[in-house]
Amino acid sequence: MKFGYFCNTTNWTHKPYHELLDETREITEYCDQNKWNSIWYTEHHFNHEGMESLTNPLMMGVDAAARTKDIRIGQACNVITFHNPIRMAEDIALLDQLSKGRVEIGIGRGIYGREAINLNKEADMKDQAKNFRLFEETLTILKKAWKEKFFNHKGEFYTYPAPNYVWQHDMSPPNKDLVNLETNVMENISVLPKPYQKPCPPIHQVVDGIRSIEWAAQQGLNIIMWIPTVKALKIKFEAFKNAKSEAEKRNVPMGEGISLVRDMFVADTMEEAKEKAGEHMVNYMRWVCHWRGLGNHMDPGEELPETKHKLDLLNYDFLHKRNLLFGTPEYVVNKINELKSELNLQNLQVWSNFPGIDHEACMRSIKLFNDEVIPKINLDNSSIEKAS
């Protein structure tokens, strides 16, 4: 199993931002030194509250590339509907060059309305159909920019090159791949640099619903999921497997192409995990579930008792049994083994720097996970391989 760290950087206590960056760097460098497979940075905007404080995963990736040697550098995710696709294609390719091919591209459509409407009105979350068309077109342009030396695009939102632009320069010989040789009007455009990885780095879409999961599989994308219970995840894993198998005309193994994010806090006792991190996790879920309620936490067919307010049932005990890797190393190992046996999970990302959590407590938890969980999971893997 490959382990990654989902670095959803938060600042609930409003410490100086440079301190927040130093803490993020410590996590990054620790994971690299201890041979974790990947580190993933997030993108959120306007979050003065402090729940999600990192605005640019690519800039964090550049910093990580300069400080690390082996760890792969991902984004979970770049909200591509917010950005000019040409500029984003250049930035991701440049990071891949800087890191000598260590980039994992993460893409998403966005979830917060105040971000979308203020960064790109075309991405307004109130019009989901239009938001998806923008997402699809942006992804199409990104792929063209990375994979084709010269390309053009004419869509609902973007046209490249700009119509009727004449290019003529003494040091740029006429090129039929670039311009109309009779008029010198640009007919194609070329984006540099190209990625270090050919034709481009792996692309992962952050997904939730079955339609998005199946669409990603049909497009040849990997996927990243987060909250659901094991029973709910099994349905989603199977949907991806089936759609990918049909698209690629092969029997895709369960779990291939999927990463799962799990909230993690390892401690010496179950009680210590709850005491040090439980309420911080609940507070974050209150933020997330404000819009969509508790549906993502439910088993298939499960019915919750009616309450006056939609989040009345949200507490530590409700979350813990459903999707938290909170507890002793032994408990966490057992929960990961359940994910392996039920889902054939191959890629796990863990998150522990929750809003309000003490950084030293966070680091101790990461180190316990590294020292007392990962070796046991990998030992189990080795035993299975030898037996087969």
Image (cartoon, helix red, strand yellow):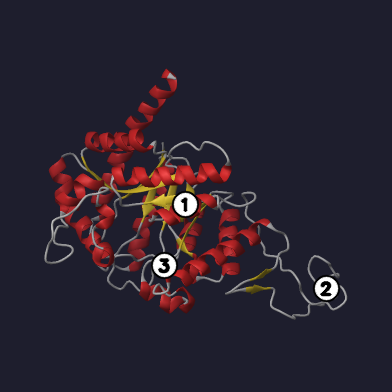
Residue type at mark 2: give it.
Asn
Task: Determine crowd level at label 2: few under 14, some 14-19, many 20+ residues with C-alpha closer than 10 A.
Answer: some
Q: Which residue is mark 2?
A: 180
Quarter of the rendering occupied by the N terminus: top left
Residue type at mark 3: give it.
Thr
Who is closer to the viewer here, 263 or 81?
81
Residue type at mark 1: give it.
Glu
Q: Earlier in the sequence, mark 1 or mark 2?
A: 2
Percent x, y of residue 318: 17, 51
Q: Earlier in the sequence, mark 3 or mark 2?
A: 3
Task: Determine crowd level at label 1: few under 14, some 14-19, many 20+ residues with C-alpha closer than 10 A.
Answer: many
Q: Which residue is mark 1?
A: 214
362 sits to left or right of 102: left
Spot the residue most to the right: 182
Contact between labelled residues 2 and 1, with CB atoms less than 8 Å apart: no
Q: CA distance from mark 3 to mark 1?
A: 29 Å
Q: Residue at x 74, y 69 (%)?
A: 188
Q: Earlier in the sequence, mark 3 or mark 1?
A: 3
Q: Which residue is mark 3?
A: 55
Contact between labelled residues 2 and 3, with CB atoms less than 8 Å apart: no
Who is closer to the viewer here, 82 or 96?
82
Percent x, y of residue 89: 59, 63
SS for tag 1?
helix
Q: Is residue 212 above or below residue 157?
A: above
Task: Determine crowd level at label 3: few under 14, some 14-19, many 20+ residues with C-alpha closer than 10 A.
Answer: some
Mark 3 vs mark 2: give the one in front.
Answer: 2
Q: CA distance from mark 1 to mark 2?
A: 40 Å
Q: Is residue 337 above or below residue 138?
A: above
SS for tag 2?
loop
Q: CA distance from mark 3 to mark 2?
A: 41 Å
